[in-house]
Amino acid sequence: MKNISKHRRNVIKLVAILVSLFYLTSINAQSYPEKGDFAKGAKAWSETCARCHNMRDPQDLRDDQWVTTAFHMRVRAGLTGQQTRDILTFLQESNNKAPKIVVTKTVASVEKSSGLTGEQVYMQTCIACHGGNGVGTVPGSPDFTSNDNPLSQSDEVLVKHIVEGFKTPGSPMAMPPKGGNSKLTTENVKAVVKYMKNTFKQ
């Protein structure tokens, strides 16, 4: 009887431990820092991390590996918690794969159906890496004002590259799908292509 009673006590202790672990895990999941700002993260990544790293491609590591790396580097690089979350958001969202698409329609009157103008899309999503003047702010970003730049390609090719993500040969970093903004629609992307061509293409 004593053995049975001891066994029951051990089972109760084990159950209590498991319940406690489950409860603590739930609290940790609920209190995990909110997602950071993608655009600010891209800027901080290029300005801060490039000092010591040769602009590693965000797809070098998985999302969970970037979590460990980012919070390790927070201490070494003297980053604030918000900067770390912004950079982590940039790295993880740059890892997201967009489904392959085939674009057959040309850019025309897309602002009405998308709710955003091309300029609004550019200022919200693209400006962090490509700059307000289109010359690029991070290593590997093309100069849209140069004679031979990506904007000379067809609308279909540009839309496909933006939606799926694209890495220019020789560039140290890839552009993530939809510039890292998963909320963009294909119409938004068409609008921003039209805006960039009208604004920067010579």
Image (tube, helix red, strand yellow):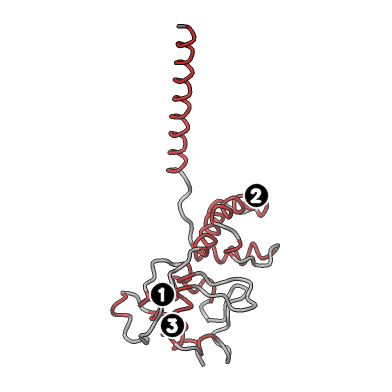
The kind of residue tagged 1 is Val
Please say if the residues under marks 2 and 1 sit with CB atoms less than 8 Å apart: no
Q: Is residue 27 above or below residue 133?
A: above
Q: Is residue 196 above or below residue 97?
A: below
In this orientation, which residue lies closer to the viewer: 186 or 104?
104
* Label number found at residue 75: 2
Q: Is residue 130 above or below residue 65?
A: below
For mark 1, give the secondary structure: helix
In this orientation, which residue lies closer to the viewer: 160 or 70?
160
For mark 3, give the secondary structure: helix
Q: Is residue 39 above or below residue 135?
A: above
* Label number found at residue 105: none
The kind of residue tagged 2 is Val
Q: Which residue is mark 1?
A: 121
Q: Which residue is mark 3?
A: 193
The residue lying furthest to the top in this view is 1
For mark 2, give the secondary structure: helix
The kind of residue tagged 3 is Val
Residue occupying image coordinates x 50% and y 88%: 153
